[in-house]
Image (cartoon, rainbow, N blue to C red):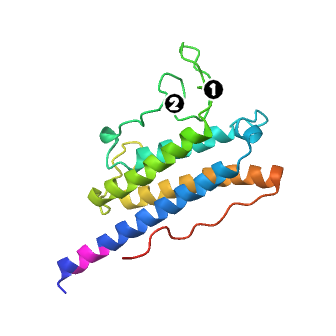
Amino acid sequence: MSEVQSESVAVSHIKHVLKSQYKSAINTLREAINLCPDELWICEDYSVQCWQHAYHAAFFAHLYACRHVDEFKPWSKHIADVQVPDGIPGPPDPESDKPLIADPYSRQDVMEYCDFCSDFFDTILETTDVGADESGFYWYPVPKLEHLLVNIRHIQHHAAQIADRIRSREDKGIRWFGAALKKG
């Protein structure tokens, strides 16, 4: 096998692993959403509600899987006319007339977004240059492969926050998802 062929096989393998781990992370988020009781989904005991963690994780999974910031097209049900369109609240902007937080996304809506993301990963990663020196996001100065790995960790982080609340309130745990795809 030539050096070029060997490099092509390695890149193909990396993309397969990335797809598998993205899908595993989304499956973890979906599991947390499924197990989250209604009263916890919109519980105001927390500064960030479970629905906000879930939507935020899906939003950034979608955004940061893009090859470049300019190619991001928001999901069809995305609510943009709020101060914090990613779902995570922050301090209000006194200059803005937009509401701070949108109405909660339903569990079904966020699950649809997770499905969208899962399909998106399959297509976008095929044409992503995982060896690129830049992430494609000017505010995130890391190589693309590292950026993709951080994105997977971000999904897991928010799924774990929801899972921790479920464990504390319901004494239920979520399943572990290792690899979502078998090497074919």
Q: Which mark is residue 146?
A: none
Residue furthest to the front in view is 108
Q: Quadrant of the C terminus?
A: bottom left
Q: Which mark is residue 85?
A: 2
Report which residue position mark 1 lands on.
Answer: 91
Seen in the image, is 80 located left or right of residue 11?
A: right
Residue at 55% over, 53% down: 155
Identified by mark 2, the residue type is Pro
Query: Which image quarter: residue 16?
Result: bottom left
Magenta span dominant secondary structure:
helix
Find residue 38 and report its horizontal and vertical position in percent.
73, 40
At mark 1, the secondary structure is loop
Q: Residues within 10 Å of mark 1 (few under 14, many from 20)?
A: few
Query: Which image quarter: residue 42?
Result: top right
Q: Residues within 10 Å of mark 2 (few under 14, many from 20)?
A: some
Identified by mark 1, the residue type is Pro
At mark 2, the secondary structure is loop
Find residue 58 and report its horizontal and vertical position in percent.
51, 45
Q: Which residue range is magenta in the image?
A: 6-10
Can residue 7 be found in the magenta stretch?
A: yes
Front one among 107 and 125: 107
Front one among 71 and 119: 119
